[in-house]
Amino acid sequence: ETAARSASSPVDLRVSFVPPRTHRGSYRRPGMPKASKKVVAAVASEVGPLGSFVDGLVKHGLTRALGPGDRVPLEIFFNYALFSLCICLGIFTASRIISPRLFKGAMSHLKPFEVKIWHTNMVTFLPTFAVTFFALPAILKYSAERYTFIAPASAETLKATGMSLGYMTWDLMVLIFDAKDQMAAYGGVTPYVLFIFHHTFSIAAWPYAVSAGRCVYFVNYFLVSEVTNFNMSLRWYLMKTNREGGSLYFWNGILWIPLFFCVRVAVIPNLVDRYLNSDWRALGPNETWAARLLLPVPVMLNLYWFGLIITTAVRFLVTGSEGGHVEAAEGARGRAKSRKKAD
């Protein structure tokens, strides 16, 4: 971890708070959790991943936007979101410089728009490592009651959310400003629109959720699911370099299925159980509507994508081609054999 925030004795940003009951036994809407003075003092003395200057800019921006006050969770989130954006820009720039030299032969067969997609897709490997690095410990350390929507986010959750939404902001800009080629790269309008909605809703909802301590358990699982990006991204490169008939393409697909199932599908019954049985009275009216509408979205998307993965895998195993055409499969195997001999 590049940030100095993760000292040998990490600061626990979790704050214990319980929604107060009224005299009638119902819950009042709790306010946004505030870090204790001890936590504020400890974290304020540490330097974020981009340095003290950016820390100051973030704090100044939050003060201008929201007024005076200690907002340590939001400061950590925005620091890591900006850090993630910088990494995205760095990966994209490095790919434009290095890839034409390192993968000259493979890239020579690409269409002009695919060369551009090559560089933007390099960035998609980032969430696999950077987000999971923080999100997995966040899940393991989560200790709130099972049926509650109210639980403060840990430092790991805030960092993972910042890294994830920094990447999504980058990817959303790519999708918007390069719409035509992005649609061509990912199979048409439907996947394109799904990515747009996925990124937009996440960017709109997650910062409030983790800073206000709402539905943090769900956000943790949505964050750690980014680990499956690796297989999807690698698959695109193998397809565009005509390696569909090779063993790497086969094993990447085979391993992708159980990984996707374990991380994104097998957890759905648990998420649904918490969604249905947690105490909705603890949330305010707007929070309730937002949670009811948005929490099922990633679940439905994961089921949709898993269905596509299974369909494609079965088609590939039966015909040797994702398109279901034996001729195409034979051509891919032939290209793989020719390339192996050339190597």
Image: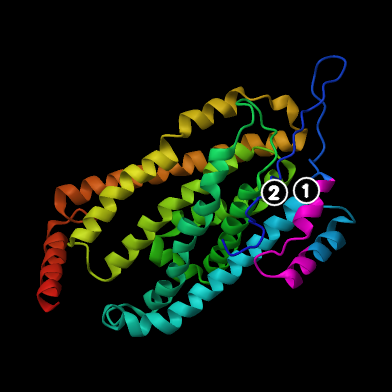
Is residue 173 in view from this perspective? yes
List x then y, in percent, for residue 221.
53, 41
47 left or right, relative to 119: right
Residue at horizontal 32 percent and vertical 67 percent from the top: 237
Relative height, residue 274 to residue 64 (above, below): above
Residue closest to the far top: 24
Seen from the viewer's position, the closer of residues 51 and 310 is 51
Residue at horizontal 74%, vertical 28%? 282
Mark 2 and mark 1 in contact? Answer it, CB < 8 Å: yes
Which comes sooner in the sequence, label 2 or label 1? 2
Quadrant placement of the N terminus: bottom right
10 Å neighbourhood of mark 2: few (<14), some, or many (≥20)? Answer: some
- SS for callout 2: loop
Q: How is the image coloured?
A: rainbow
Q: Position of residue 117 (x, y in %)?
A: 42, 72
Vertical arrangement, residue 77 with respect to residue 265, above or below: below
On screen, residue 94 above or below 135: below
- Please provide the residue range marked out in magenta: 37-58
Q: Amino acid at mark 1?
A: Val
- Of the 4 image quadrants, the one containing the C terminus is bottom left
Q: Amino acid at mark 2?
A: Val
For residue 11, the mark is 2
Q: Which residue position is annotated with label 1?
A: 39
